[in-house]
Image (tube, grey):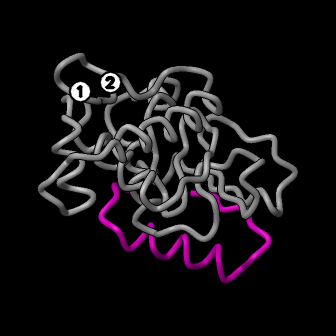
Amino acid sequence: MLIVSGDEVFSFALRQYLEDSDINASVLDRCVLVDLDFSSGNVGKGTVTFSRDEKKNPDLVRPFLMKDLERLVRTRFSGDNIDYASKEEDIFLSADGVTYKGIFTPLTPKEHDLLALLVSNRGRALSREDIYKQLWNDDTANSNVVDVYIRYLRKKLDFHFGERIIYTRRGCGYYIK
C-alpha cells in the first residue's frame, strides 16, 4: 500500500486505519492512495483518490468518513481477479455526496438519504409511500415530496453522470439497477 499525500498526519492516519482493519493484506498491497491536493494527478487503475476539491473527480471528497474509505477499498480491490472497470459502475456514497464512474456530485442531506435508501434496495422498486414513510417518518404520503426529490436527484445524477441512474417501474415505484 502506497500513500501519496502532502499531509503526513493524514497519510499516517489512513495507513494506520486500513492496516488495523480486517482487510486482507493482499488487498492493501494493491492500493495506491493519492491526495489530489498534493499530487499532479496522473492516477492509475489501482488508485483511490481523495481531495478537498470535488472538481478533480476524486473517489472521496475530504473530509470523509473512514468507513467510507474502507468500503471503497474493499469493493475496489477485494475478490478474485476483480476487474477495476467492472467496479467503476458502483455508486459510492460519502457524507456529502455520491461518486459514480469517478465523478463526484454533492447532495443535500435529504437527497443523500433518498439515494442511500434506493442503493440499499438496489433492483427492488420502492413505492412512493414506502419512501415517504422511511424518510419523512410519516404515515400519510399525501404530498408529492418524494417525486420532487426524485426529480432533484435525477437532475443532478443524470446531468453529471451522463446516463440514467434512477428508474421508474410503473405501478411499483422507483429503483436503481
Residue drawn where x is 62% and y is 22% of the image: 162
Comparing 125 with 136, the one in front is 136
Dot 2 falls on a residue whose secondary structure is loop
Verify whether residue 20 appears in magenta.
yes
State which quarter of the image contains the C terminus. Answer: top left
Q: Nearer the viewer, residue 24 or 116?
A: 116
Work out whether 137 lies above or below 73.
Answer: below
Q: Which circle marks residue 123 in the picture?
A: 1
Residue furthest to the bottom in view is 9
Tags 1 and 2 in contact by the CB under 8 Å rule? yes
Depth check, front residue: 106 or 41: 106
Q: Secondary structure at mark 1?
A: loop
Instruction: Count every numbered label the image shows and give the total.
Output: 2
Which corner quadrant of the image does residue 138 belong to?
A: bottom left
> Residue 85, relative to residue 60: is it above or below?
above
Give the residue type at disc 2: Lys
Q: Which mark is residue 177?
A: 2
> Residue at (32%, 37%) from the top-left corner?
79
| Residue 7: assigned label | none
Give the Cα separation between the discs numbered 1 and 2: 5 Å
Instruction: Tell me the quarter of the image containing the N terminus.
Output: bottom right
Q: Left or right: 18 with respect to 145? A: right
Q: Residue furthest right?
A: 40
Please provide percent x and percent y for residue 99: 55, 44
Q: Which residues are magenta?
A: 1-25
